[in-house]
Image (spheres, rainbow, N blue to C red):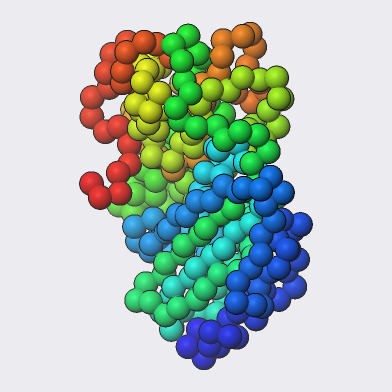
Amino acid sequence: MGELGEFGLIALVNHGRTQTRGVLLGPGDDAAVIAAPEGRFVVTTDMLVQDRHFRTDWSSPHDIGRKAIAQNAADVVAMGAVPSAFVVGLGCPSDTPVEFVRELNDGLWAEAARAGASIAGGDMVRSPMIIISVTAFGDPRRAPIRLTGARPGDVVAVAGKLGWSGAGLAVLTAAADRGGDLLDEFADVVAVHRVPQPPYEAVLELPDTVEITALTDVSDGLLADLGHIAESSGVAIDLEAAALAVPELEAVAKALGANPLDWILAGGEDHAFAATFADSGDLPEGWIRVGRVLAGSGVTVDGTPRSGLTGWESFA
């Protein structure tokens, strides 16, 4: 990167890229211009720091790029908004290979396209480690779905894979001591840890007739994120362990001597969605009932508070 330089990098990451219609003015000027057809927009920012949120010996640059976009796109979708544009800040050492940045950029664009948006601009600086900061914009096609609307009697449901990322992280950690056979045997969960798979369509394709009362992206762990809904809404949530079971994780847990429910409840970085719905019949396609909203406070599993780890906390 030291040889290519800042403006060479800017040219590299923008070459041949086509902006989606949400970007009225893309890279090349002092700032981008993003459409706001509803007269407002949703915006969020998330940051990934090398060896804290990703490891370059565990994930390819393409994987890291996809993960950076996915975790931001999921936050936008969790508000009921359609991703419209992303702005990316990149810090890296001057000896970072150009090919690393090229593959990272390909991953950023690949996930942006999966979310239906494009990368409108950003910034590049030299730093002692690789840092990726993404700001995501979204077009709210409905009233924002907040954490505050859950009511006693609502159904709690999830869409997406829970516990797979935590299982993948456990496999990667164990493989460092026990060898690479684990990586081959459990490649499916490792792949999900490297590249989260938010089911954007489960939210964006909800019929207008569906009454969804609260919604969150499961990034810190199911217990932690449902805890935010329970606290914000002034309710209690009780989960059913049997409804949360993921058969695909049983073999991983057996090999590592772990409890798969720990990954499902507190693993984090799943970027699935958890929501509360008015109890009015069948759930929309892609959603699975896992519990109930009750009067009271806190989150329980089969009526009992969960001890031990409840999720990710950045400064813990």
Q: Is residue 283 above or below residue 130?
A: above
Q: Nearer the viewer, residue 22 or 311?
A: 22
Residue 40 as seen in the image, left or right of residue 232: right
Residue 1 as seen in the image, left or right of residue 308: right
Quadrant of residue 54 within the rendered picture:
bottom left
- Residue occupying the point 50% across, 26% down: 214
Q: Position of residue 130 (x, y in %)?
A: 41, 69
- Residue occupying the point 72% across, 49% down: 37
Residue 80 as seen in the image, left or right of residue 219: right
Q: Nearer the viewer, residue 177 or 170?
A: 170
Q: Is residue 164 above or below residue 122?
A: above
Q: Nearer the viewer, residue 91 or 35?
A: 35
Quadrant of residue 313 within the rendered picture:
top left
Residue 57 in view here: no
- Residue occupying the point 52% across, 58% down: 135
Residue 33 in view here: yes
Q: Position of residue 281 (x, y in %)?
A: 63, 8
Q: Nearer the viewer, residue 237 or 53?
A: 237
Q: Position of residue 315 (x, y in %)?
A: 25, 50
